[in-house]
Image (cartoon, helix red, strand yellow):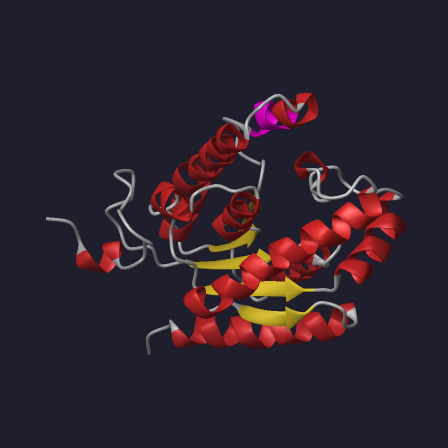
Amino acid sequence: MPNREKLSRFFGRQLPETPEEPLTGKLFVIEGADGSGRSTQIRLLTRWLESKGYAVKQMGIKRSNLAAEQLTLAQQSNVLTHMTMTLFYATDFFDQLVNQILPALSASSIVIADRYIFTLMARALVRGTDEKWLRNLFSAALIPDGIFYFRSSPEQLIVRNLNKNRSLDYWESGMDMGLEPDMFNSFIAYQKLIMNEFDKMTQEHGFQVVDADRHVFAVQKELRTKIKAIIKGGETA
């Protein structure tokens, strides 16, 4: 019979590749749009956690050995349907879950996810994908120990992206959806749609909303306080 304790850590069905040993590590998820400060905060968190003696593993979208390169090429060619692209992203995610996240958690490491299934679902939902189908697709995902949603205004995101990259990303602007002919207006419209989906998820999944428009060290201080509490709360005397 399946281990009830293990099953409770998944949104739905348990992956057959789940290790027999307990998942003693912690999984923290950082969600938010490009320009919300995810990369900077994850870098600072990793240094801090490692200084405290924790082994840290990072994962993120388009980082699997199996699908990352092909997924990038598919995006560049822009020839896949929205559903096919979602399946491609799901392949990338579950390859990392099986081969990187679960082994790291079994080894008591801390895993920090630079976006998770919530971004994948939000992107698919605003493009008209059926929600029930999406929930079933990602039902074997592991439930994180903490989910931090970096909320930032679309206007602030534009400023940060232009300062960093001198341009806006085609996909993060929703240009494939035909929302607006102008990339700047399309970016704002698209990000508002994504934010609306995240706001819906916040209540259901217990997102801890972080004001990402604040100074980098103010955000980092908040994250450290909350993550420390979660780690300490899961330790036994």
Image x and y of residue 176, in percent: 68, 34
Q: Quadrant of the C terminus?
A: bottom left
Would you say 126 lies left or right of 182 here? left
Q: Is any atom of residue 46 visible in this view?
A: no
Q: Position of residue 73 (x, y in %)?
A: 65, 22
Q: Which residue is found at the position 32% from the left and 53% from the top?
A: 10
Which secondary structure type mostly characterizes the magenta part of the structure?
A: helix
Quarter residue 179 falls in: top right
Q: Nearer the viewer, residue 147 or 230?
A: 147
Q: Is residue 186 left or right of residue 194?
A: right
15 and 177: which is toward the camera:
177
Residue at (54, 52) in percent of width and height: 113
Q: Is residue 222 left or right of residue 91?
A: right
Using the image, determine if residue 78 lies above or below residue 232.
above
Residue located at (67% from left, 57% from top): 192
Residue at 54% x, 75% y: name it: 226
Between 68 and 32, the one lying in front of the other is 32
On whether residue 203 falls in the magenta region, the answer is no
Q: Is residue 104 visible?
A: yes
Residue 101 location, x and y as percent?
44, 46
Looking at the rendered structure, the number of numbered marks drawn on it comes to 0
Quarter assignment of residue 74: top right
How far across and how far down the image is residue 5, in percent? 22, 60
For this orientation, the residue located farthest to the left is 1
Eyeballing the image, is 199 above or below 55? below
Q: Is residue 159 above or below residue 199?
A: above
Q: What range is drawn magenta here?
A: 68-72
